[in-house]
Image (cartoon, coloured by chain):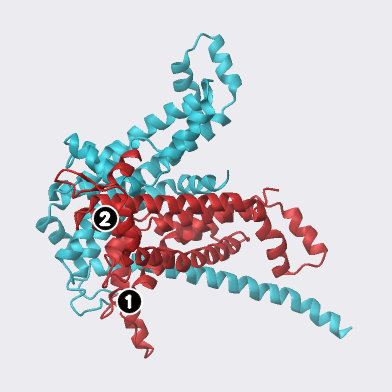
Chain colours: A red, B cyan
Amino acid sequence: MVAAAWISLQKWNLISPMEFIGIGNYANLLSDPETSEVFLHTVYYIVGYLPLVYIGGLALALALNTALKGRSFLRGIYFLPVVTSWIVVALVWRWLLNPSNGIVNTVLAFFGIAGPGWWSDPVWAMPSIILASAWKDLGFVMVILLAGLQAISPDLYDAAKVDGAGWWRRLTSVTLPLLSPSTFFVLIISLINGFQVFDQVYAMTGGGPNGASEVVVQRIYDLTFRYGAAGEASALSWMLFIVILAITLIQVRGQRRWVNYG
Amino acid sequence: MADTLTTKRAMPRRALIGWIALHVIIVVGAAVMFFPFLWTLITSISPGAGLGVTPSLVPENPSLEAYVRLFSELPFLRIVGNSLLLAVITTLVQLFTSTTAAYAFSRLPFRGRGVVFAVYLATMMIPLQVLIVPLFVELKTFGLLNTYLGALLPTFASAFGIFLIRQAINQVPRELDEAATLDGAGHFRIFWTIVLPNIKPALATLTVFAFMGSWNSFLWPLVVLRKPELQTLPIALAGLQGQYTTEWDIIMAGSVVSILPMLAIYIFAQKYVIQGVAASGIK
């Protein structure tokens, strides 16, 4: 950490001697429009990804928490992408979403819909990454929420039923409040991982086309190994770390308001 | 009278329809979730897939040509070997470091234990991305770039592992330790004959996670192992794209090779994987 801070104050390309430039790297980063771009793209990723995996994972957890035949088999299928590597996920989705002859656009064409260019189109690149990521992590969120659901006492539901609460009422007044610790965990993990998103971006779009899906860590990698700006990369790492730390602390502070440890 | 009759009959019917709808949705959902895997496999055995060709669901001329090319045109056997070697060493070392550290944190009452534990976990939760440049420099200084050791070093201790094993050891009744101490057993005997046999499920969970973490890891090996013959599977796969841009049968064959070992472990140890994830969500 200290070394990262020290390097962030240098002008350095990994090879020639360092040259001390103080906060120059930070000043450069802050004035470079690319910096706010990559943070914006990262936030775009999180904002698209989080509701998708949370609502999807919750729906699955609720469904699989009922007396369903073959429940553990189904749970196993939904969880399968979680054990697959991000690179494989990225490659497989690059192929599924291939603009010219991927299966998704082929099926869409069958229904007379012209599919978009997905990862090759600046507008659709990020949604493609979000889709692939949500597919991979859905099972993870489902298992966390399922464990939370199973800790809720059935007596509470019986009591709610006696009081005449319908399905929706039981969900919003019993399930969600008692599930809040699990929700909190999913939120924290997703935000931390979301800000560090890299593997799938690197393999799916490489940050392209034209930087349309360039995220913070991709930028750190490019600065270090492509543009020989290790000092600036370190400074950007520090900025990312501070953002993650701040958001996590705000979450931990704010949890008292809504997380119910009953 | 007629009204009550119909509602009485309608209620179970509504419940039944709901029950069927739930099953249909969840099964169709599982099929959609599983389809990408199936499609990967189908593509890998459909020669010529990708060059303007979408493979059909039932391949017309199924062949293993893509696999043959993968292993003959690239040092793919070596690459799989690299991945396997790193994953096995990472797993063994993590089992050792996590159990010994967790034992110390659970059973040895030393001054400031809580603080040390917290600092330990906190430092290891700092994202690798923040440390990548200084770690890279450190490895370069010690001449560890392009070595297995360099790729392995940051994986030797795992915050998740220590946390998981400590939780498990805390569940082992202390009376067992005390009885053994009376019989003259030292820490090593207690650790080996009492604690370890009682935390087998947690050990299984850690084994799977350590192996999976190493097998799937990307950023660090990408930075350290820059020679082609040292590459691990995920890096080689990412590279396939540049080499075989449109030859999707080959890229998907590589993906299948990468998925299979994890799939085998997963089928074998599904219970432990899911338990591990579930346990991490419950504080």
Against A64, residue B176 (above or below) is above
Residue B201 seen anywhere in this rendered image of the structure: no
What is the x, y in percent for residue B130? 34, 48
Residue A16, image quadrant: top left
State the residue lying farthest toward the left.
B73
Q: Quadrant of the C terminus of chain B?
A: top right
**Labels 2 and 1: the sequence-earlier one:** 1
Q: Amino acid at mark 1?
A: Trp
Q: B37 or A90: which is nearer to us?
A: A90
Quadrant in the rendering for residue A17: top left
What element does badge 2 sit on? helix
Which mark is in front, 2 or 1? 2
x, y percent for residue B169: 52, 30
Q: What residue do we see at 18% from left, 41% from top?
A: B145
In the displayed structure, would residue B28 be above or below residue A110?
above
Residue A220 in the image, given as x and y percentages of width and height: 29, 55
Question: What residue is shown with label 1?
Answer: A118
Residue with the mark numbered 2? A221
**B223, A84: nearer the viewer:** B223
Q: Residue at x 26, y 69 (%)?
A: B43
State the SS at label 1. Answer: helix
**Label at residue A94:** none
**Type of residue at label 2?**
Tyr
